Image (spheres, helix red, strand yellow):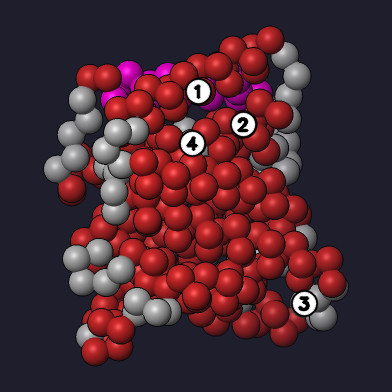
């Protein structure tokens, strides 16, 4: 789906929620493929090839805009670079986490980053309660795995911090109005930054080129399409509402984990996920109504 198509339809009345469902589906379809690749290729290498592939796709697609847009200012390049590094590190740590944790549960824990951004951008008792619910949900989920997968938890909390950075910096990059080119340039920088983690273990991919192809497909689904849609939506709605809509991602991850990976959450895990999502709903319900705000 092209950026202009998303923008036209957002303006024409189709709710942003519909685009978030599409974005979440693309991202976690990619995650399901990635998990299956872990048997043949190290998670760090899958993340690296994913970022490289997504950067190449975004840059190629945006060549006309890059040629028309003129020189980038130092601020534009720096913002895109920080954004791309945050995305690359988020992808890397997320894959290292879901190699050890169930995908749905991992995404729910990772969601503490967006809820913190949402809580810090508003001032009310409701927001404090929301943050408390989300934190309690994370404690419930973390407590389940603490004895068995502490490294997985470390990686998912790092991914959570990167996700929060992605939202804050992503809004600035979206405001630059460089389109998908900003995502592509940023991801290219991010690929260089995580190369020391992904390149050393990438040997199997060079002897089986099909693995690289699958990783590029993951990059197309999860980064180019998924993040591309989010970048467009970030220009149409405020960060606080954006954080609410991200609640659709953990739900989608649980569904994909159950359907494709046979990862069935337990009752207490459902409870933890519900607490996280309840926190987001409470925090953001007062800003769901506006539809004409821009990022």
Give the residue furthest to the top: 125
Q: Residue at x 50, y 48 (%)?
A: 159
Q: Are marks 3 and 1 in contact (CB under 8 Å)?
A: no
Q: Nearer the viewer, residue 285 or 51?
A: 51
Q: How far apart are the alpha carbons under marks 1 and 2?
A: 9 Å
Q: Are marks 1 and 4 in contact (CB under 8 Å)?
A: yes
Return the x and y of residue 37 as percentages of the image width and height.
24, 66
Residue 290 disc label:
none
Classify 10 Å Cα crowding around label 1: few (below 14), some (14-19), many (20 and above): many
> On screen, 68 above or below 91?
below
- Say which residue label 4 marks: 111
Mark 2 vs 4, N-terminal side: 4
First to last magenta residue range: 269-288
Return the x and y of residue 236 as percentages of the image width and height.
67, 44
**Could one spot residue 224 in this view of the protein?**
yes
Q: How far apart are the alpha carbons under marks 3 and 4?
A: 35 Å
Classify 10 Å Cα crowding around label 2: few (below 14), some (14-19), many (20 and above): many
Residue 116 disc label:
2
**What secondary structure is found at the residue carrying circle 4?**
loop
Q: Residue at x 68, y 10 (%)?
A: 125
């Amino acid at each position: 789906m092209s950026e202009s198509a998303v923008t036209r339809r957002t303006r024409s009345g189709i709710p942003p929620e519909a685009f978030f469902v599409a974005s979440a589906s693309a991202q976690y379809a990619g995650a399901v493929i990635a998990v299956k690749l872990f048997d043949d290729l190290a998670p760090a290498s899958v993340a690296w090839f994913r970022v490289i592939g997504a950067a190449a796709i975004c840059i190629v697609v945006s060549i006309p805009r890059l040629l028309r847009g003129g020189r980038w200012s130092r601020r534009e390049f720096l913002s895109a670079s920080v954004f791309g590094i945050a995305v690359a590190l988020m992808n890397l740590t997320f894959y290292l986490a879901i190699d050890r944790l169930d995908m749905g549960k991992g995404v729910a824990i990772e969601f503490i980053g967006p809820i913190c951004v949402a809580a810090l951008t508003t001032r009310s008792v409701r927001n404090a309660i929301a943050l408390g619910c989300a934190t309690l949900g994370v404690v419930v989920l973390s407590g389940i795995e603490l004895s068995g997968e502490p490294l997985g938890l470390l990686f998912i909390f790092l991914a959570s911090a990167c996700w929060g950075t992605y939202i804050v910096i992503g809004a600035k990059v979206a405001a630059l109005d460089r389109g998908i080119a900003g995502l592509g340039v940023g991801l290219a920088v991010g690929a260089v930054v995580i190369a020391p983690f992904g390149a050393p273990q990438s040997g199997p991919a060079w002897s089986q080129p099909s693995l690289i192809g699958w990783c590029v497909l993951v990059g197309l689904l999860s980064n180019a399409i998924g993040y591309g849609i989010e970048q467009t939506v970030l220009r149409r709605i405020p960060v606080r509402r954006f954080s609410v809509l991200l609640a659709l991602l953990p739900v989608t991850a649980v569904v994909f984990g159950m359907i494709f990976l046979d990862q069935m959450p337990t009752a207490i895990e459902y409870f933890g996920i519900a607490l996280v999502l309840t926190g987001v709903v409470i925090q953001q319900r007062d800003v769901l109504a506006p539809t004409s705000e821009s990022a």
